[in-house]
Amino acid sequence: MRPNAWWALLQQGDETVVKEPAGEPQIDYRENGDRWVPRGDLASCILSDGGPDRELTLLVDDNELSLAEFGRLLAVHA
């Protein structure tokens, strides 16, 4: 897709951002896809270097995700 066509398509989208209410989970684990998925469009997280060999990890709710797992979570919106 050409950049101008992509931008025109993007402009047609709904710009409403959905955030889960405080105290509600921000992500869910789906066993059938073996992946985490967002419940809304916005998630708060804490970054850490606590993974193997100081790998970057993200703590969302009480779930520690590797950078690869978080990338798969974000891919839901791609």
Image (cartoon, grey):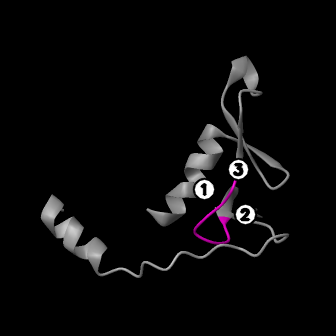
Q: Position of residue 28 (x, y in %)?
A: 75, 65
Q: Earlier in the sequence, mark 3 or mark 2?
A: 2
The residue pinned by badge 2 equals 27
Q: Are marks 3 and 2 in contact (CB under 8 Å)?
A: no
The residue tagged with tag 1: helix, strand or loop?
A: helix
Identify the disc placed on residue 73.
1
- Does the magenta segment cover residue 43? yes
- The answer to which image quadrant residue 35 occupies is bottom right
The residue tagged with tag 3: helix, strand or loop?
A: loop
- Magenta residues? 38-44
- Does the magenta segment cover residue 62? no
C-alpha distance separating marks 2 and 1: 9 Å
Name the side, left or right, on which 8 lies relative to 38.
Answer: left
- The answer to which image quadrant residue 9 occupies is bottom left
- The structure residue drawn at horizontal position 77% and vertical position 27%, both measured from the top left corner, is 50
Along the viewing direction, whichever of 46 and 64 lies nearer the viewer? 46
Q: Earlier in the sequence, mark 2 or mark 1?
A: 2
In the depicted structure, whether residue 26 falls above or below residue 75:
below
Q: Quadrant of the N terminus?
A: bottom left
Given the image, on which type of amino acid does mark 1 rest?
Answer: Leu
Residue 33 in sight: no
- The structure residue drawn at horizontal position 57% and vertical position 69%, both measured from the top left corner, is 41
The residue tagged with tag 2: helix, strand or loop?
A: strand
The residue pinned by badge 3 equals 45
Question: Dot 3 surroundings within 10 Å: few (below 14), some, or many (20 or more)?
Answer: some
Given the image, on which type of amino acid does mark 3 rest?
Answer: Cys
Question: Dot 2 surroundings within 10 Å: few (below 14), some, or many (20 or more)?
Answer: some
Question: Dot 1 surroundings within 10 Å: few (below 14), some, or many (20 or more)?
Answer: some
